[in-house]
Image (spheres, helix red, strand yellow):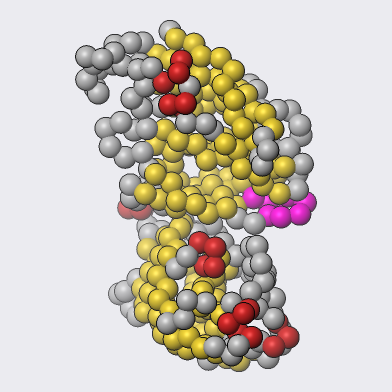
């Protein structure tokens, strides 16, 4: 294990939980045993100590990490290749479980640390890290969603393992002037598509990610962000369809989303009361949304509802 005495930046996506001047970082390279795809790592930290576990992986592989600490102020972060101060995942925000496809080839770092208040009190923590890296072969390539979209000099890499009824969605922006922090969230279903657009024509693009739930209903949902004044990402809110009295009548899922010029369009079959899930007879409904500013982000407001 190599001891690094010089200060490496420990600040991550949103906050720096450590004081670099007082910390030492231990680095350990991790290589899985031949024929295996994971390992269980254990150790102990005290005060401002940090442990970096370094693992090599390929783009498109899925990393799964479960962290079990003895001290609730201990966490782990996941740093992408070449990064000292930007994380794909921050445990103090997202918790002790990480699962996501990886955006690029290289050496990833699992950083274990104590939060600043616990480090200041010289607390200690024992921990285990259960790490698995799977996929990357032809059998898994068909399930992973991995697409990079670019507009107006800003790009978005959108990734999801798509191997469960619940999946983690990772959005990695590039080209924003202030904050290019990745966005990681759990979605109910699999990612079926993504588009980049500028619906409000303000020169700052948006990313729209389409999700379809498991089961016979295939209910659609949306994850979307706007490059707010080209500086950082702001969430875009899509109100639930059941809040709209006109749109919700006869709705039973099977949604499709698409960007059409300066609107987001949602289409789905309309069901009559006696229809079975496989046989809707009420035609189709199309909802057109316009992007408008909200109090804490952006809102997709219903502009028109059309039946045909």
Q: Main secondary structure of the magenta part?
A: loop
In the rendered view of the protein, which quadrant contains the C terminus? top left
Any part of residue 86 in sight: no
Answer whether residue 175 is magenta in the image.
yes
Relative image position of residue 277 (x, y in whole percent): 25, 23
Left or right: where 257 falls relative to 301: left
Any part of residue 215 in sight: yes
Relative image position of residue 240 (x, y in whole percent): 47, 31
Snapshot quadrant of residue 215:
top left
Looking at this view, is 271 or 181 the one in front? 271
Answer whether residue 112 is magenta in the image.
no
> Which residue lies most toward the top here?
308
Snapshot quadrant of residue 249:
top left
Left or right: where 191 falls relative to 13: left
Q: What residue span does the magenta drawing correspond to?
A: 173-180
Relative image position of residue 33 (x, y in whole percent): 35, 80
Looking at this view, is 285 or 39 the one in front? 285
Q: Above or below — where is 306 with respect to 100? A: above
Identified at 60% across, 55% down, the residue is 182
Snapshot quadrant of residue 284:
top left
Identified at 37% across, 63% down, the residue is 134
Looking at this view, is 169 or 234 the one in front? 234
Relative image position of residue 227 (x, y in whole percent): 69, 42
Label count reads 0
């Amino acid at each position: 294990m190599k001891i690094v005495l010089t200060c490496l930046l420990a600040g991550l996506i949103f906050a720096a939980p450590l004081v670099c001047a007082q910390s030492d970082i231990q680095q350990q390279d991790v290589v899985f045993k031949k024929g295996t795809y994971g390992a269980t790592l254990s150790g102990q930290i005290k005060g401002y100590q940090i442990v970096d576990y370094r693992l090599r992986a390929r783009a498109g592989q899925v990393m799964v990490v479960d962290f079990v600490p003895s001290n609730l102020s201990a966490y782990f972060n996941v740093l992408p290749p070449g990064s000292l101060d930007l994380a794909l995942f921050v445990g103090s925000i997202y918790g002790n479980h990480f699962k996501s496809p990886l955006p690029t080839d290289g050496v990833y770092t699992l950083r274990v640390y104590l939060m600043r208040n616990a480090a200041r009190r010289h607390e200690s923590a024992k921990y285990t890290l259960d790490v698995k890296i799977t996929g990357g072969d032809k059998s898994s390539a068909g399930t992973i969603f991995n697409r990079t979209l670019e507009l107006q000099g800003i790009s978005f890499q959108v990734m999801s393992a798509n191997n469960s009824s619940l999946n983690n969605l990772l959005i990695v922006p590039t080209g924003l002037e202030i904050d290019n922090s990745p966005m990681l969230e759990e979605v109910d279903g699999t990612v079926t598509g993504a588009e980049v657009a500028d619906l409000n024509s303000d020169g700052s693009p948006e990313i729209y990610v389409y999700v379809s739930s498991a089961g016979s209903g295939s209910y659609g949902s949306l994850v979307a962000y706007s490059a707010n004044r080209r500086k950082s990402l702001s969430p875009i809110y899509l109100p639930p369809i059941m809040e709209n009295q006109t749109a919700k009548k006869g709705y039973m899922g099977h949604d499709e989303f698409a960007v059409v010029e300066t609107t987001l369009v949602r289409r789905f079959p309309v069901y009559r009361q006696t229809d079975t899930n496989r046989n809707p007879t009420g035609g189709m409904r199309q909802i057109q949304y316009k992007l408008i500013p909200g109090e804490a982000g952006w809102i997709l407001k219903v502009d028109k509802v059309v039946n045909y």
